[in-house]
Image: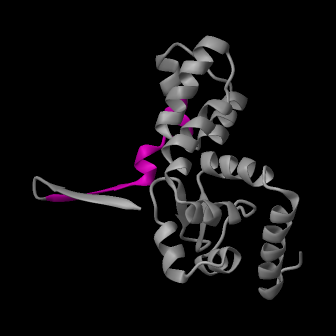
Amino acid sequence: NSFRFQGGGHVYCIGANDFSFTREDCRKYFAKAGIVLTDAELSQLLKITDGWIFAVYLQLLFYAKNKRFEKGILSTLIEKAFFDRLSAEERNFYISLAPFNSFTQRQAAFVSGKSAEFVSAHLTEGGFIHYAEKRQAYYFHNLLSEYLGNVFDGLDEGERNNLLEKGAEWEEKNGRKV
């Protein structure tokens, strides 16, 4: 996902990575606020935020007051900014992919039961879904992945098992042992 704009005779591409901090960016950002993070704290921060600038900012505010990070403050943000705006069909699509660390478009279509067109349109939305070129697979931003995992865990057992069985069927059809 990238945005293009032209200025001064040049074309600039802005991708999702341009809205994320690196490990070193996070270290410097916290240092500017007078907070020196350990390597373990930096790792925890990046695991929670995936470097997403706004999430890092929220964690900075929380850390400055509480001397620790908090995962929960970001769940509400994901819910309000992304999940609540989806139709029931879209929510079910994303929830069906929650058990996977990564997935292809074909896999997403099989597991969710959605058309290739639906899948393609919904895997290119915003900064919460990334495409790993080398693996040729999609994966959710850490924040969305954790949120969807919690929603998935909250499903009734029968619904969870149906989705897991569909995922296992995909894996078996593609030569992977489950």
Q: Residue at x 49, y 43 (%)?
A: 81
Q: Residue at x 69, y 34 (%)?
A: 44
On screen, residue 164 versus residue 18, left or right, reads right
Quadrant location, the N terminus: bottom left
Give percent across and percent down for residue 58: 53, 27
Q: State which quadrant residue 78 falls in.
A: top right
Quadrant where the C terminus sits is bottom right
Residue 75 spot, x, y in % from top left: 62, 38
- Residue 102 versus residue 110: which sits nearer the camera? 110
Q: Is residue 74 rendered to the left or right of residue 177?
A: left
Q: Which residues are magenta?
A: 10-26
Residue at the location (48% across, 80% down)? Answer: 117
Whether residue 60 appears in magenta in the rendering, the answer is no
Q: Is residue 69 visible?
A: yes
Quarter-of-image position of residue 91? bottom right
Asked if residue 14 lies in the magenta stretch, the reply is yes
Question: Residue 85: where, in percent of width, then height?
Answer: 49, 51
Residue 120, placed above or below residue 78: below
The colouring scheme, among rainbow, by chain, secondary structure or one colour, is one colour
Observer-nearest of 99 and 84 = 84
Kindly indicate the quadrant of the structure image that contains residue 93. bottom right
Task: Decide which of 42, 160 is in the foreground and name it.
Answer: 160
Residue 51 appears anywhere in the view: no
Q: Residue at x 62, y 19 (%)?
A: 63
Please tell me how many numbered marks the rendered image carries: 0
Residue 30: x and y, percent?
A: 53, 22
